[in-house]
Each structure stands twice: as C-alpha cells, then as structure tokens.
Amino acid sequence: MAKEFLASTGECLSDLDLLRRYEPVIHFTYGEEYFPSGVDHYVKQCGLWVYQPDGRHELLVERGKLSLDELAKPRVASFGATHHLKFSDALPPTEVAAFYLQEKRQLRKTGALRPKLGRLARVGYGSRLLAALFSLTLLLRGRIPGDMAAAASLASHSMQIWDEPGVYYGRVVRENGWTVLQYWFFYHFNNWRSGFSGLNDHEADWEMITLYLSEEDGQLKPQWAAYASHDYHGDDLRRRWDDREELELQGDRPVVYAAAGSHASYFKSGDYLAEIEISFLAPLTLIIHWLYGFWTRTLRQAGIQGKRKPLNLFSIPFVDYARGDGVSFGPGQDHEWRPVLLDPAPAWVSQYRGLWGWHAHDLLGGENAPAGPMYNRDGSVRHAWYDPLGWAGLDKVPPPAQERTVLEQRKVALLARQQELDLKISTLSRDLQTMGEELAALRSGPHLATLYAEQEESLEDVAAAVQVLRKERAENVVLIEALEQRIAQLAGGERDDPRAHIHRRAEPAPLEGLRLNRWASIWAAMSSGLILICLVVLLIWGRHHLVLGLIAVAGALASIEAIFQRRVVQLVTGITILLAILSAGVLIFQFFWQIVASVVVLTALYLIWQNVRELRR
Amino acid sequence: MVEKVGSARRRTPAITLATWLLVIQGSVMLLLGGLLLLPFVLKGFANIRPDQTALLGDAAVDGGLLVALGLLLLIIGVGLFFRHSWSWLLAMTMQGVNLAVALASYFSGDRDLWLFLSMVLGLLLVLVLNQHEVRRAFQR
C-alpha cells in the first residue's frame, strides 16, 4: 500500500488514511429508497446469467450460490454475449398491487418527495410532445418492468436491515503530480423513472466522486472536486476547492447532494432540469439558433430575457431532485462510512466485465444495468477509471505548486527555439538574397529560360520557408510575453477565476415565476395529449376551417401557458412580433420586384455618392 | 407625471422615432375618421335621408372608431415620448391589433394601398419598439 509522507507534520498517511480524511458527506433527498451499500451481500442475493446473442438468458450460477470470488471467475462466452446479474424476480400481480398500495399509504403518511412542480411544466410544448413520444418508445424498447422495481425495493429493504449501509469503495491514483482520491458508491437499484418520473430504471447503480490533491508547502492539499453526474465528463464536472460558492465543505469534507432515484451527484441542493437532446433534430436546433442570432444581433431585437440562445425546443426534460432533505451519510451524520479499498483492484472489479443487474436489452442502454466501477456496459474500460484526470478535464492542468515551474520550463524552451529560429532565418535570408541575384543574372539570355524557371521555383520555396519561420518567431515573442505575464501573476499570488473552466454549469432550476404550481403541473401533463386530440378533432370535423382552428388552438394553448407562467406581457409581445413577421412576408410576396428594384436603386445611389465624394477630396 | 430619467431610461433616437411613427399613425387615423364623420358634421344627423341611413350609419361607426383609435395612438405617443412604462405595452398591443386587422383584411382579399401602408407602419413600429435599448428604457 502506498504511503504519503507529509514533510510539514512528519505524518505518514496510508491510502486508506487519505481516503478517510476527505471522505464526503452525502445528503439524500427525502423519499430516497436506496443508499450506498456493500456489494458482497448484494451479489449473494443475485443469480449470474448470460444474455446470448439470440436473445436467450441462460442461468450460470443460481441465487444464493454466487459470491464475489465466484463472480470473478473467468467465463468463456461467444461474441455479442453479455454476462449479467439478476437481483430481483418479477412479483405476482397481487403482490405488486399490494406493494404499490402500501407505498402510497406510506407516502401519504410520511409526505415523502412529491415534486413541487412537474418536469413538463418547466419546458415548452415541443419538449412535452417529445417527452410523450419518448414514453411511448418504452413500449417498444426493452425496459425494467414495474414488478421488478417493486421486487427490488422489497429485496433491498429486507437486506438493508442486516446490511448496514454506508459503504464506499476507495481508490487512490497518483499521476502527473496529482493524488487522486476516488470514492465509488454502489446502490441496489436506480428507480429514477418509476419513483421520480425520471429517464430510466435499472438494477444496480455505480456512482462516484473524485478529489484531486497536490502537494503545497510540503502538505497534501485538496485542490479540486469532481462529481459524477449521469454520463457527463469534462471540465464542467469539477469545482475548485476554494470556490465556496460552488463547493460546499463541512470541515475538510466535500458535501454531495445525491439526486433521488438516479443518485447523480450535485454540488448544490435543488431540482435540476436535465434535458436530453435529440441528436437527429440537431440541424433544426442549429437553424433556430442562427435565426435567433440574426434576430438579436443583426436586427438588434430583444430576445428571450437573459438568454443568449433560445430555449432548446427539441429536448426531453427530466428533473433530478437533489434536495438534500433526507438521510445523510458521512462522519457525524445519520450513517457513518465503512471504507473498502480497491487497491489493488480486487478480482470482482478487474475480472468481472458483465453488468451488475438485469440486462433489459434496451437499445438506448438506459434501462440496462451498469457494469462495475472499472468497465462500461460494452466491456471497455471506463474513462473515469483509466484516466481520472482527463475524465474531469484536469489532464491539462498542472498542480498549483508546479504551475510556475511548468511555465518557466516552457519559457526556457521557447527562448532556445527563438535562438535556433534566428540562426535559421539569417542563413535562409542570405541564401534567398544570393538566389535573387542569381535569378537576376539568369535574365540575360533566352537560352537560360528553363534554368531561370527552375531557379525561380526554388527561390519561392525558400521564401515560403523563411516566411513560416518568421511567423513562428513573431508568435513566440507574443507567447513569451504572455508566459512572463502569467509567471508574474502567479508570483504575486494571484489565482485564476475558479469558474473560468466551466462552460455549462448545472444550476438548480428556479421555481419563481411559476404560479398555481399544482395546476401548472396538471396542465403540463395533459397538454401534449390535448394538442393531439385537438388536431384529430380539427382534421375530422373542422377541415374547412383548419387554419382558423389551428390558430385558435395555438392561441388558447399559448394563453393558458402564459397565465400559468406569469408571462402575459411576453405573450402579447410574442404575438405582435409573429404578426409583424407575417406582415413582412406578405409585403415581400406582394411587392417583391418593387423591393428588389428599390434595393438596386438605393445601392446605385450609394455608389454614386461614394464616387462623387472621392472626386471632391 | 414624468418619471425620473436614469441612464437606462434615456430618450434614445429609437424612442423619438417610435413616437413620430405613432403620431403619424394616429394622425392618419384621425384624418380618415374625420373624413368619414365629415358629412355628419356638415349636415347634422337630423338632415340625413332615410335611404342613406344604413350606409352612413356604418361610416359613422367606422369614423368614430378611427377617431378614437387615432386619439389613443396620439396619447400613447405622448406617453412614449415621456417614457411612461405603460405606453410601451399599449403601443405594442395596438400594433398587434393593427397588424391582425390588416392581415385578416389581406387574407379576405383586400389589396388596398392603405392596407399595405398600415402594415409597413406597424412592422416598422414593432421593430423599433422591440429594440434592446427601447425595451430596456421601458422596463419597470
């Protein structure tokens, strides 16, 4: 086991000590059913199966006979086969009904999470229609059936009586001057869809947070924290340790808000609107963005308040409820942690590449159980495992104590390169002058034409090479200046903006501005269905007045929405702008040639004016 | 009462232009309304022959409406000039009504020059009123 020696205190910290020192505090949402648990009891409860390419599920090891060692045993399988566990068996309908009845009673009694505002009330009609279509696809795609979710809940509850929750699997990686602490959490089930109207359900769930430490004044100090959230990766996932507005700490421990059902980790408590973008509609979104840019920048028109881009009309909305008002895990919280070190990675981590729960053969993958901490569902190694720095975009950032050294080294290298460039440029410039003179000499007779052409070509090549070198030298001058400026800035103790790396920050969705929350939610839930019914009614009975009918329906929908969202002024403005655009279309259609002729005449007059002005100078 | 003028509530050229456009729009309506009402002013209601009653009755309604709208537009123009916050929303609403009526007339087959002029004026006013700086100047 690696040990970290701290010069300042003379302390010698083992990996486990390090993990314990910074272990996080996780606040769950009230109503959450699944908590970080150990894998050993879960695996004992599971059967091991293989999903064959022909669609059959074959049982390999029965429930009760499986252990972590058994799981790690190498097993031969054909291409396209997937090993997977099965945690819960489907319940008979009577038991499912009994379960949901009891759950409903429990909800009434405890008042557990009831979303304050439905996800659909927060987005527009386009997204609502897409969300409805997405729900319909669940009928065609593979999915975790409701009885399995009920069975998982019962099984998990019975296990959690004797399986004390609060287990994390820790891992320490040292790379490029960074000491990386990874905390992996295992949950029996992800009930985001069935429990909280989210995107998916699946058996087993692996979540993770990572802390990045580096040595400063002989002491190992945390510099960054990155929380895994769905399958995102990159700069947006991490926050700087000293950015207290963005990263909440309890002493030396980062605070995590785990979303209900999905267990995605967030830095702040709140309801997060996660929009899943539909890739094949991306060109349409691009066109809308271009038109919006033309409208706001070229025509200098006011856009949607506070938005540089229009709302994404073609995305499916889901809400992650990370309210932090439920059970808490961590030192001094409702439940303490029991750490398990994954160093070296035990066989059940490194050898078992299969899924940790039921393979629902969902084409989109969301309903299939995840693989272990080391692997993706397809058996490839997880980005966060093999490249924990790159996963949070930290591979391009040196530890703070090394920043100046890195910059100094680069500056020295650049200065050396400048000397080299000076020498090369001076030599080539002399060659160029000589070649120029030779060329002048070759102009004297027609018999030298061929030689002249060849020489001219060589001269052009050398001139181009000199130009490239001169450009590099000029760019290096600017770069060296910038490096010197940054070195001085760091020497003065000035640090960068802690949020400069964040492009798209996950922020809790604001609730203000939406009134009649319950009615808004009911309306939002009903609206997409009502739109379709109205369309059908119009097509069957109102074909003669289809346009008028559509306008009336659109007007009514927009008005109801505007009232719920306190946007009556925006509605009036929007309708007026729409009418103005229509009028512009009518005018262009009616007076197209007159408009073209006017533009040409105006251009001609402008040209004449410009030329006459030139004459008068 | 004139509201306090801060840096964001300066009278920009766009606001002056919007005021002038509204005054033109209002004056045209007043003029048209006045022309429609002229026979009643000259002759008096009592002297109208029974066979002219229906036709002139419509003209009186249209004329009265145009005069009222023209006056309203002039008042909004004044409000806009002095940057009263209510005037912006009223001006925008009036343009919405104006354009809706113009478009409805167009799609019913009307191709009158006045109709297109009204559309042009409405379109210009919407584009001016919706400028960033104009909206900022009237935000409460």
Image: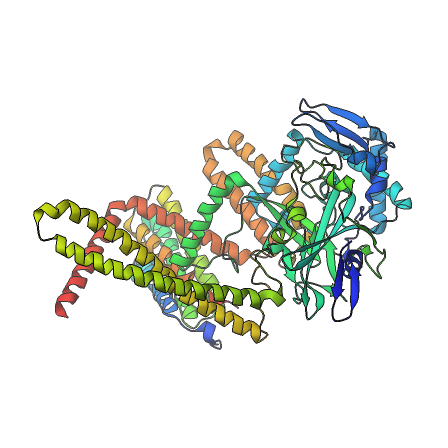
- Closer to us: A119 or A189: A189
| Front residue (pair A277, A466) | A466
Does A17 sit left or right of B81 as displayed?
right
* Closest to the observer, A193 or B55: A193
- Answer with the quarter of the image where residue B37 lies: bottom left
Could you say which is closer to the camera, residue A400 or residue A522? Answer: A400
Identify the coloring: rainbow
Residue A516: percent from left, percent from top: 67, 54
Occupied quadrant, residue A346: top right
Asked if residue B43 can be seen in this view, the reply is no
Say left or right for A154 vs A460: right
Give residue A370's position: percent from left, percent from top. 71, 39
Is A537 rendered above or below residue A485?
A: above
Can see residue A343? yes
Residue drawn at x 57%, y 67% as measured from the top left: A405
Q: Which residue: 75% across, 41% down?
A: A349
Residue A27 x/y as whole percent: 77, 56
| Most distant residue in the left direction | A445
Q: Where is residue A172 in the image (x, y as percent from the top left)?
A: 73, 54
Q: Is residue A466 above or below residue A65?
A: below
Total of numbered circles in the picture?
Answer: 0
Left/right of residue A540 with respect to residue A355 in the rendered view = left
